[in-house]
């Protein structure tokens, strides 16, 4: 027999960025909210606290802040004729666990999508014609616009204390920012972070190439700051431990530092950690959710009844819960019907490393997770697809999040992988090299999707989530084109060696190599319930008291990191719940 808890107004699954935002907004509205987090409670004190020495082995090898793949993982295959196998070691992407989720171990890059990113399909058709889109590419327009989300982009940046420089302010271009961005209603919360040497050199090279460099918007505080919720942040001290780690200095924005201090004292909010949600409970007709079933910290099956269910897990596991619970129709790639699992996409990431002599001191051990410099001259509408050969766009950026011996030291071309030659190469490279990254968009395809695995089960007896994904010609061309442009820019700086890792024709997706944690799609938002799982307010088309904010809602991925967009969409969703749904529960958009 399950333990049955008292009914609450809302139950939230997951306590990362989306869960924290929704909990704050719903308790602001006076709702009783229970949040279920599968991992442990985490906070700056004691989990990330100064003066504890940051341990590279603990964070980057033993993966302390990431989910346990022994309990819950995904299976992965390249195409429908392959047999999927489990993802058993952290490689390509890094889902978090515990309070803060991936929002505690992210780097801090905090972009807004470009206005044209919201209308990818119609934009391509208008510029190049419908026939330009390859067969099998399933890109869609978002059912919202940049203008809809601008107030929410702005608010999330101020919650995070984002450091940066406006490029377009109230319709007017501003010197020093991104001239191609959508118009902002006000400046960033904080000015840009200081540049490291590689970023200063990036400015020089980009300008010589005729590009328009600007500071990466970074949720790594450039100065002391108090956010709209009264949460305090301190200036980043360039420790070089953002990616894979929680911030010891209250400098990197996270749910832990920026929202949780407010939530923890609220009477209407209850956080239950080590609570593994197994499924969303539905009525017999599957039209309404009645709550969720989970295993509590003692392993006891527990039911939490609720009027509203908000799925705020990592994007992949939002989709997994919807499939396991029977919310909506699973996607069938053969007939191209169904919606749950549809339009899975990722991020197209490559690197160009520059090696200099001993007169150039790069000091890789220092760093700011989101600090640095980038360009949008190859992104969005700045990319002429007829010339570049691919749909989408991407960034080239100079970013130094920190490096160390355990995390790996890049060596110049020709250096052996072991022995005295390798040691000599490491010595020459560690303080005298840096890298520029190329981050590109990833389009969605009919044969890239998420489903339930027919063979493998998790530690709780449920079918694992199965990912079917591989690189397509469009993304391979994008990688080659952007790496070539980055390499051309690097040559301006006169390094003694350059090493790029552009994808080669025929390359397959390599799950063992980290590329980004930017997994997107699978339960996407749209205007048509036949081709989307969620309506424009992130509400399930099929079960109206279920909302699922997160990167799972992206119909495809753009050239930016998704966190800024995820936060803005979550605030947009919360506004709709508070101002529309609570007054008249039911579908907010008629199918």
Image (cartoon, helix red, strand yellow):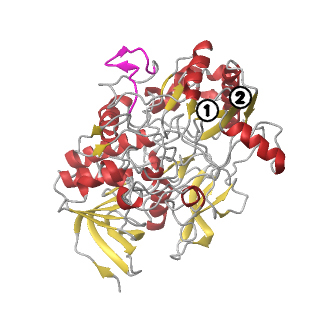
What segment is highlighted magenta in the picture? 163-178
- Residue 8 in the image: above or below residue 78: below
Q: Which mark is residue 324?
A: none
Q: Is label 2 in contact with label 1 (beta carbons under 8 Å)?
A: yes
Residue designated by label 2: 356
Q: Residue at x 42, y 56 (%)?
A: 48
Residue designated by label 1: 362
Q: What kind of element bears circle 1? A: loop
Task: Determine which quarter of the picture holds residue 378.
Answer: top right
User: x%, y% of residue 431?
Assistant: 65, 36
**Camera-side residue: 475 or 533?**
475
Q: Quadrant of the N terminus?
A: bottom left
Q: Is residue 393 visible?
A: no
- Residue 390 in the image: above or below residue 56: above
Magenta run includes residue 171: yes
**Camera-side residue: 290 or 2?**
2
């Amino acid at each position: 027999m399950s333990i049955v808890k008292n009914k609450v107004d809302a139950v939230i699954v997951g306590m990362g960025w989306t869960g924290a935002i929704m909990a704050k907004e719903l308790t602001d509205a006076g709702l009783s909210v229970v949040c279920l987090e599968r991992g442990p409670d985490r906070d700056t004190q004691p989990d990330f606290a100064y003066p504890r020495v940051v341990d590279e082995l603990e964070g980057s090898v033993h993966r302390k802040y990431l989910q346990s793949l022994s309990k819950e993982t995904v299976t992965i295959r390249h195409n429908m004729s392959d047999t999927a196998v489990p993802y058993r070691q952290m490689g390509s992407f890094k889902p978090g666990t515990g309070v803060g989720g991936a929002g505690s171990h992210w780097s801090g890059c905090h972009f807004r999508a470009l206005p044209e990113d919201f209308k990818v399909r119609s934009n391509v058709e208008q510029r190049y014609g419908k026939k330009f889109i390859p067969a099998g590419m399933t890109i869609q327009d978002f059912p919202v616009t940049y203008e809809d989300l601008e107030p929410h982009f702005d608010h999330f940046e101020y919650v995070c204390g984002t450091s940066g420089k406006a490029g377009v302010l109230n319709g007017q271009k501003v010197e020093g920012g991104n001239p191609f961005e959508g118009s902002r209603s006000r400046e960033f919360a904080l000015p840009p972070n200081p540049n490291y040497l590689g970023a200063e050199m990036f400015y020089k090279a980009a300008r010589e190439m005729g590009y328009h460099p600007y500071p990466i918007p970074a949720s790594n505080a450039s100065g002391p700051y108090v956010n709209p919720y009264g949460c305090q942040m301190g200036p980043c001290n360039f420790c070089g431990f953002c990616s894979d780690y929680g911030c010891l200095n209250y400098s990197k924005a996270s749910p832990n530092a920026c929202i949780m201090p407010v939530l923890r004292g609220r009477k209407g909010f209850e956080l239950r950690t080590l609570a593994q949600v197994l499924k969303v409970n539905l009525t017999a007709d599957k039209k309404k959710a009645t709550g969720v079933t989970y295993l509590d910290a003692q392993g006891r099956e527990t039911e939490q009844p609720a009027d509203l269910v908000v799925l705020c897990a990592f994007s992949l596991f939002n989709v997994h819960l919807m499939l396991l619970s029977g919310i909506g129709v699973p996607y069938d790639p053969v007939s191209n019907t169904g919606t749950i699992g549809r339009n899975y996409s990722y991020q197209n990431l490559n690197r160009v490393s520059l090696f200099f002599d001993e007169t150039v001191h790069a000091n890789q051990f220092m760093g700011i997770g989101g600090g640095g410099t980038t360009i949008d001259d190859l992104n969005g509408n700045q990319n002429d697809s007829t010339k570049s050969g691919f749909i989408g766009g991407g960034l080239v950026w100079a970013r130094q999040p920190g490096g160390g011996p355990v995390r790996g030291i890049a060596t110049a071309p020709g250096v052996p992988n072991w022995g005295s030659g390798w040691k000599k190469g490491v010595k020459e490279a560690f303080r005298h090299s840096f890298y520029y990254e190329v981050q590109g968009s990833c389009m969605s395809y009919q044969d890239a999707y998420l489903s339930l695995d027919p063979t493998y089960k998790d530690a709780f007896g449920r079918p694992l989530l199965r990912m079917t994904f591989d690189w397509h010609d469009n993304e391979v061309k994008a990688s080659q084109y952007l790496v070539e442009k980055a390499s051309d820019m690097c040559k301006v700086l006169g390094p003694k060696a350059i090493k790029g890792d552009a994808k080669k024709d025929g390359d397959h997706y390599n799950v063992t190599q980290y590329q980004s944690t930017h997994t997107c799609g699978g339960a996407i938002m749209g205007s048509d319930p036949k081709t989307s799982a969620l309506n424009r307010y992130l509400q399930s088309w099929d079960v109206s008291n279920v909302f699922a904010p997160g990167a799972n809602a992206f119909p495809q991925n753009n050239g930016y990191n998704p966190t800024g967009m995820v936060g803005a969409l979550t605030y947009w969703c919360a506004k709709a719940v508070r101002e529309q749904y609570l007054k008249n529960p039911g579908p907010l958009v008629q199918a």
